[in-house]
């Protein structure tokens, strides 16, 4: 695949000292993780309000956990794809690089990204509803549903941001700071349909960043992109890293 990037645009990308990327479910699609809004997307077969809201969990924690247990079991055997590895390499290419992800699958970390800003949480973490303590739990399937806090016996919930909930203020601050300060901002594999994540693209642009989009199709933020690369991120990103590393 030859990327359609002009020499001027490539020069500008290489000159960036502060870069950031916002990723979405599309980055993990080639690893086999289902996306949310595409043809086979999760929100085509499931109603978010039944499964991914605090009200749903209060009503039926077992049902909510069965769904997360199914997703955890589906993701557990999957591996990062070349797109994840290319993003991990970007930490070595740019003096400062912040990876912001909406994904909860943990595949960026598995590929070697050192400190991904996980805006929507992580499916491998649980949180005690009483104490708020966060623990890693990689068992899939879980032996007991719903799982309970080993310390106090209260229910555990997935450490994931549900519809109607606020994002962690520290995580939000990291993401917004990276967007404001970026000279180069990648938006990759996201339908840009969920706020506040999608607004990061406009914020980066307003603060002067060059915006590069990688997606198989157009999105609501395509008009903000200085460069649009159409195609699967697992193919495009390794190619892009090669170009950025070339003399
Ligand atoms: P979506 O499923 O809404 O969008 C996936 C995007 O990836 C679409 O724009 C596709 O065109 C694109 N895409 C698919 N395959 C691709 C590939 N191989 N390479 C590049 N692009 C590809 O997923 P998100 O935008 O991540 O929230 O969804 C955002 C949030 O909505 C999720 O984090 C989740 C969901 O509700 C929570 O769980 C809190």
Image (cartoon, grey):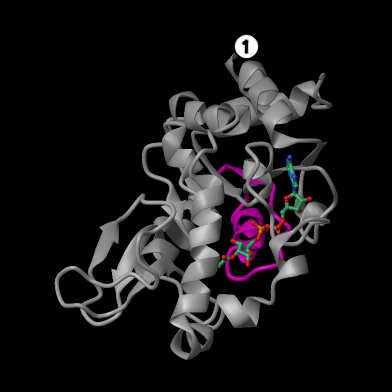
> Residue 219 lies in what quarter of the image?
bottom right
Q: Quadrant of ligand 1?
A: bottom right
- Extreme residue toward the left, this view: 151
Based on the picture, tell me whether residue 207 belongs to the magenta stretch. Answer: yes
Residue shown at the point (72%, 68%) measured from the top left: 43
The foreground one among 12 and 30 is 30
Residue 176, visible in the rendered structure: no
Q: Mark 1 = which residue?
A: 246
Question: Which quarter of the rendering shows the N terminus?
Answer: top right
Percent position of residue 88, x then y: 48, 31
Q: Is residue 188 above or below residue 88?
A: below
As rendered, which of 240 and 86 lies closer to the eye? 86
**Residue 170, position in %: x, y?**
35, 65
Q: Is residue 230 left or right of residue 175?
A: right
Query: Which residue appears at 62% of the width and 32% of the height?
Result: 83
**Element under label 1?**
loop
- The vertical placement of 172 against 26, above or below, is below
Residue 54 placed where, x, y %? 48, 84
Look at the image and say whether residue 110 sits in the magenta stretch: no
Q: As drawn, is 166 to the left or to the right of 151? A: right
Looking at the picture, how far across and down is residue 87, in whole percent? 54, 33
Q: Which residues make up the magenta segment?
A: 182-208
């Amino acid at each position: 695949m030859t990327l359609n990037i002009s020499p001027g645009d490539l020069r500008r990308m290489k000159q960036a000292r502060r870069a950031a990327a916002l990723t979405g479910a599309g980055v993990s699609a080639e690893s086999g993780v289902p996306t949310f809004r595409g043809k086979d997307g999760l929100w085509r077969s499931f109603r978010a309000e039944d499964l991914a809201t605090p009200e749903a969990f209060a009503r039926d924690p077992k049902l909510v956990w069965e769904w997360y247990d199914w997703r955890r079991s589906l993701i557990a055997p999957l591996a990062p794809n070349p797109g994840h590895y290319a993003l991990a390499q970007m930490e070595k290419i740019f003096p400062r690089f912040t990876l912001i992800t909406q994904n909860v699958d943990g595949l960026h970390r598995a590929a070697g990204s050192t400190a991904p800003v996980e805006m929507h949480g992580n499916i491998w973490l649980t949180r005690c509803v009483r104490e708020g303590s966060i623990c890693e739990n990689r068992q899939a399937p879980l032996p007991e549903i719903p799982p309970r806090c080993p310390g106090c016996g209260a229910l555990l919930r997935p450490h994931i941001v549900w519809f109607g909930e606020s994002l962690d203020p520290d995580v939000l601050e990291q993401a917004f700071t990276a967007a404001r300060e970026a000279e180069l901002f990648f938006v990759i594999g996201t339908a840009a349909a969920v706020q506040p994540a999608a607004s990061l693209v406009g914020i980066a642009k307003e603060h002067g960043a060059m915006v590069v989009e990688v997606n198989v199709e157009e999105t609501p933020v395509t008009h903000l992109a200085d460069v649009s690369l159409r195609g699967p991120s697992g193919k495009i990103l390794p190619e892009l890293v090669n170009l950025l590393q070339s003399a």
